[in-house]
Image (cartoon, rainbow, N blue to C red):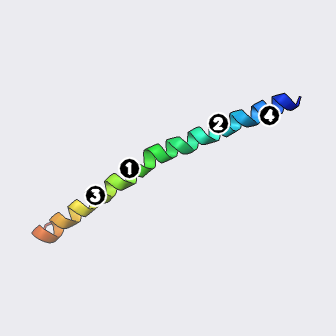
């Protein structure tokens, strides 16, 4: 019985780690990329004055 509980806990821990890793893999590059895009667009706006 204890072994089954340990196995279930390990599976849930693996699932949590997988979700955390996917979140990190997706959103960190996305936010860093958006930062550079926004900085580039703001620079263009300041230089040209066009919206």
CA–CA distance in space, label 2 to label 3? 33 Å
Q: Nearer the viewer, mark 2 or mark 1?
A: 2
Mark 2 residue crowding within 10 angstroms, few (<14) / some (14–19) / many (20+): few
Tag 1 residue? 30
Q: Residue at x 51, y 41 (%)?
A: 22
Badge 1 marks a residue whose secondary structure is helix
Query: Is residue 23 positioned above or below 44 on the image?
Result: above
Query: Residue 30 at x, y = what percent?
Result: 38, 50
x, y percent for residue 50: 13, 67
Circle 2 SS class: helix
Q: Which residue is mark 3?
A: 36
Q: Contact (CB < 8 A) between labels 4 and 2?
A: no
Residue sitting at x 64%, y 36%: 14
Tell me which label, 4 or 3, sits earlier in the chain.
4
The local crowd at label 1, few if under 14, some if 14 to 19, many if 20 or more residues have their Cα within 10 Å, is few
Q: Which residue corresponds to mark 4?
A: 6
Numbered circle sitting on residue 14: 2
Q: Is residue 25 left or right of residue 4?
A: left
Residue 40, percent from left and from top:
21, 60
Q: If you read the primary sequence from the N terminus, does the residue marked by circle 1 or circle 3 appear first? A: 1
Task: Classify mark 4: helix, strand or loop.
Answer: helix
Q: Are marks 1 and 4 in contact (CB under 8 Å)?
A: no
Q: Is residue 4 visible?
A: yes
């Amino acid at each position: 019985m204890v072994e089954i509980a340990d196995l279930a806990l390990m599976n849930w821990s693996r699932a949590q780690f997988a979700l955390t890793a996917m979140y990190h893999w997706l959103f960190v590059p996305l936010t860093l990329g958006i930062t550079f895009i926004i900085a580039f667009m703001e620079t263009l706006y300041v230089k040209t004055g066009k919206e």
